[in-house]
Image (spheres, grey):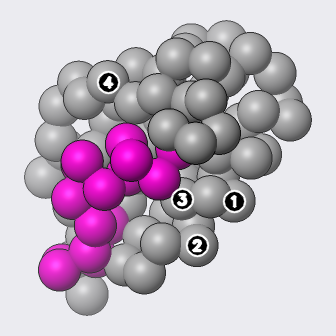
Amino acid sequence: MSTETYRFSTTGITCGGCANSVITILKRLPGVAGVQVDVAGKTATVQVQPGGPSVEALQEALKPAGYGLIPEKTIA
């Protein structure tokens, strides 16, 4: 099954604990196949299965926890 990969700049992620929280929140969303967070680089990469959550849904899932995702590009 193919996935779509989104790359984001992040806000509010300042430590490994923050990164783990973001990974946990996003992996709970149906259709999220994988999440990687680079604290030092302030980036996140999210793999989404076809029909999975939109960029906006990923962003909304993190807002209550105080984290943000700023879209950079989609990787085919």
Residue 58 position in % (x across, y down): 37, 52
Q: Amino acid at mark 3?
A: Leu
The quadrant holding residue 13 is: top right
Residue 21 in percent (x, y) is at 74, 47
The reply to whether the C-beta atoms of the residues labelled 1 and 3 are less than 8 Å apart is yes
Whether the residues at callouts 1 and 4 have beta carbons within 8 Å, the answer is: no
Residue 14 horizontal/vertical position (percent): 74, 15
In percent of width and height, residue 4 lies at 22, 61
Give the labeled residue for mark 4. Answer: 70
- Identify whether 6 is placed above or below 61: above
Callout 1: SS:
helix
The span from disc 2 to disc 4 (Cα, nearest Å) is: 20 Å
Q: Which mark is residue 67?
A: none
Camera-side residue: 12 or 31? 12
* Residue 26 within the segment the image draws in magenta: no
Amino acid type at image mark 4: Ile
Q: Answer with mark 1 or mark 4, whichever residue precedes in sequence.
A: 1
The answer to whether the residues at label 1 and label 2 have Cβ atoms under 8 Å apart is yes
The residue that label 3 is drawn on is 26
Q: Is residue 70 above or below residue 36?
A: above
- Amino acid, disc 1: Thr
How crowded pointer 3 is (Cα within 10 Å; few <14, some 14-19, many 20+) is rated as many
Magenta span has 53?
yes
